[in-house]
Image (spheres, rainbow, N blue to C red):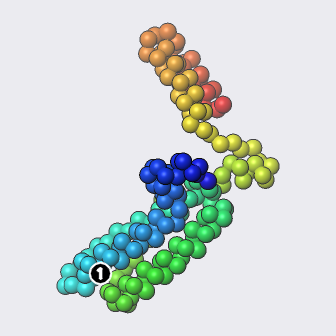
Amino acid sequence: EVPKEEAAKPEALADWFYFSPFMDEAAVSLSMDAVRELRLGQRNSTDYLTLTLGATDSIGHRFGPLSLEQFDNLLRLDRQLETLFAFLDREVGNDKYIVAVTADHGASDIPEHRMEKGAEAFRVTSDDMDALLGEVSKYASEAAGGVTPPEKVRSEIARIAEK
């Protein structure tokens, strides 16, 4: 939950929107406006409309693929697709358009859920990453200056990455 003083900031609203199903709802709505206004699929030419629905990805990364947030998102996405296809049937005509669906990747469960199941897991924070990059940079600088032999740099960076 966003603290009240933070919620008024535009970047907080953008962050909330990005990790919500409303991002896809807006994209579907805009695509239907484009079909209607530009008469896509209703002229004597081939039209191409690309629609990216990315809430499943962003919500999966933030809350995990097994979260209630993702479940809610998938139910809403199913309804949005139903709305879009019914709209295309009416505006363009049933069997007069082609839909191609692609995906980029799956997602692993979030660390907190894995820990609840007894698995060894942890969340990497930006502070963790800064510390890691600081250590790696130190060894890289030493290697560039000839202070540390390249073999030692490689083994130290491998040790840091394993940690």
Give me the residue at 48% from left, 55% from top: 13
> Could you tell me which quadrant the C terminus lies in?
top right
Residue 54's x, y, as percent? 47, 62
Give me the residue at 57% from left, 17% from top: 152
Judge the density around disc 1: few (<14), some (14-19), many (≥20) Cα neighbours within 10 Å.
Answer: some
Label 1 SS: helix
Residue 28's x, y, as percent? 41, 73
Give me the residue at 66% from left, 52% from top: 110
Q: In front: 146, or 16?
A: 16
Give me the residue at 52% from left, 13% from top: 149
Using the image, determine if residue 4 lies above or below residue 54: above
Q: In front: 125, or 151?
A: 125
Label 1 belongs to which residue? Answer: 36
Could you tell whether 69 is left or right of 15 in the image?
right
- Kindly indicate the quadrant of the structure image that contains residue 130: top right
Residue 131's x, y, as percent? 58, 27
Residue 84's x, y, as percent? 42, 80
Using the image, determine if residue 74 lies above or below residue 157: below
Q: Is residue 158 visible?
A: no
Q: Amino acid at mark 1?
A: Arg
